Structures are given as C-alpha cells and as structure tokens.
Amino acid sequence: MSLGDEDARDSAVETQPDANSAPASKRSRWRRLYKRARRRVGLLLVSACGPFVLGRLARSWRMQVIGEEHLDRALGESRGHFMALWHGRMVLGLPHHGKRDWHVLVSPSADGDISQRLLEGFRYAVIRGSSSRGGARALREMLAVLERGSVLVITPDGPRGPRHSMNPGLAWMARATGYPVVPVGFGVDRAWRLRSWDRFTLPKPRARIAMVYGEPVRVERSATPADLERATQAIHDNLIAAEERAFAALGARIDW
C-alpha cells in the first residue's frame, strides 16, 4: 500500500463519527446542568436561611478586639475610612460591626446576591460594583458614604482570588477619595473551612475569635504608579501582620 493510500485510510478513520461521542456529550451537558441546578438550590437555601442560622451561631462566639488605637487614629484623621479584610474572613466580623453605619462593596454576581442577603441580615448596607462591572457608579456611592463619615468594607482578594492576592485597586480608591485604609485581621481557634479558593472560614459554636485592627495606610492624591504599588504592598503586609497577631493572641495555629 502506498503512502497516499495510508493517508486516505487515516482521513477516512478521522472523519468517521464516533458512536460514543454523542452520548458522552449529552451526559456531560446533563452533568453541568445538574451541578448548576444544585448550586442554585444551595444558594437559595443560604439566602433564605443564612442570616437566621448564622445569627444564632454567632451568639456563641467570643470576640477579642485588639489594636483599637489604630481605628481611633483613622477616625481622628478622617471619620470615613476603608476597612480591608480577606475574602475568606467575611463572616467573622459580622456580629461585632453590624449595628454600625458600615457599608460593604459586593460584586454584581450570583455569589454577590447571597452575600448581600447575609450582610443585610446583619444590618450592613451594600454597594454593588467591581472593577469590571458598575465601577464608576460604585465609586460615586463609595465617595458619598465616606464623605458622611461612614466605613466602607472591601475584600481586596475578592471576588475571584487568588487567596491573599492584591491589585492596586484599593490603593487607587484610597488615592482617589483621600481616605485611609485600615487593615483588619482575624484569628479563630475552632472553625470549619470550605474547600473554596478563599478557604472560607465559619467559626464553630463557642469559638474564640480575635480581631486585630492593623496600622492604617493613607495614599496621597499625588501618588505615582510606583507609590500605588508600595501602598498596595503596605496594605497587604499590614493585613498579614494583623492575622498573625490575631492567631498568636489565641495561641492557635495560623491556617494559611
């Protein structure tokens, strides 16, 4: 058989439809639909029951607050300020700050819808937006919140991660608005940790939690791109230091 005959045979084999491909594709499609439906049902359950269940659970937590002098310093410089914490720690501070005039920046996504329900259940106000969707409108809302002396909570590694990552977005907002950033770290001695990108932390009943306010970071309006990079690194480092101090205060092993 010549080389041409072999090519013709190979071509025929390659173009011949695979009898198993259609059923496999159908199974894959149904699997995706099942996972999507299961996720949607789970999100609806969390949305409906989350605030009540989490509120009951949070009543058993014991909170220790450290570094309030840093918070007082930020309040002394300007009443309004940013509060930065890691995405996976969102739940830990909810009961402590819920009765204050605090706002939280939440992404305009399906997960953001659930976060909004949980946050509003603890009396937080929510601003929907991100760097890619609703950014300009969200920035106007954030500036109005800060100007009236409220606190704006941001998770710099959210909503997609990677965990404990940061881009210059928060430093840029601090420069644009003129308000300082207060990093907040959390430690917990007993918790469930989800297998998500952020290792989402849910303290167990009667868990001890340490919340540490870190050194504030202010970004001047004249800051250059290099200054923004340095400010971003400072916020990151202060957040890490606050978490290390929080776990040390509990005598617990740090979970990252």
Image (cartoon, grey):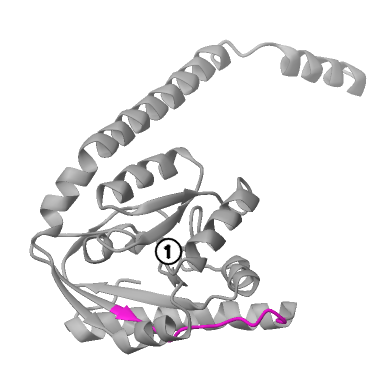
Q: Is residue 215 magenta?
A: yes
Position of residue 237 measured from the top left corner of the image (x, y, whole percent): 48, 82
Say whether residue 81 is visible: yes
What's the residue at 47%, 80% (across, down)? 78
Give left or right: position of 113 versus 25. Answer: left
Q: Residue furthest front?
A: 148
Q: Quadrant of residue 198?
A: bottom left
Specify the quadrant that holds the N terminus. Answer: top right
Q: Which residue type carries mark 1?
A: Val
| Secondary structure mostly taken by the magenta-highlighted segment of the chain | loop
Is 199 placed above or below 3 here?
Answer: below
Give left or right: position of 47 versus 1. Answer: left
Foreground residue, 182 or 123? Answer: 123
Position of residue 162 measured from the top left corner of the image (x, y, whole percent): 51, 61
* Residues drawn in magenta: 212-223
* Disc 1 element: strand
What's the residue at 33%, 83% (across, down)? 244
Foreground residue, 77 or 94? Answer: 77
Is 97 placed above or below 212 here?
Answer: above
What's the residue at 50%, 18% (across, down)? 24
Foreground residue, 28 or 55? Answer: 55
The residue carrying mark 1 is 153
Is 202 placed above or below 113 here?
Answer: below
Foreground residue, 241 or 71? Answer: 71
Specify the quadrant that holds the C terminus. Answer: bottom left
Say whether residue 198 is visible: no
Position of residue 76 measured from the top left corner of the image (x, y, whole percent): 42, 86
Q: Quadrant of residue 206?
A: bottom left
What's the residue at 38%, 52% (across, down)? 125
Position of residue 82 measured from the top left corner of the image (x, y, whole percent): 47, 70
Is 256 placed above or below 222 here?
Answer: above
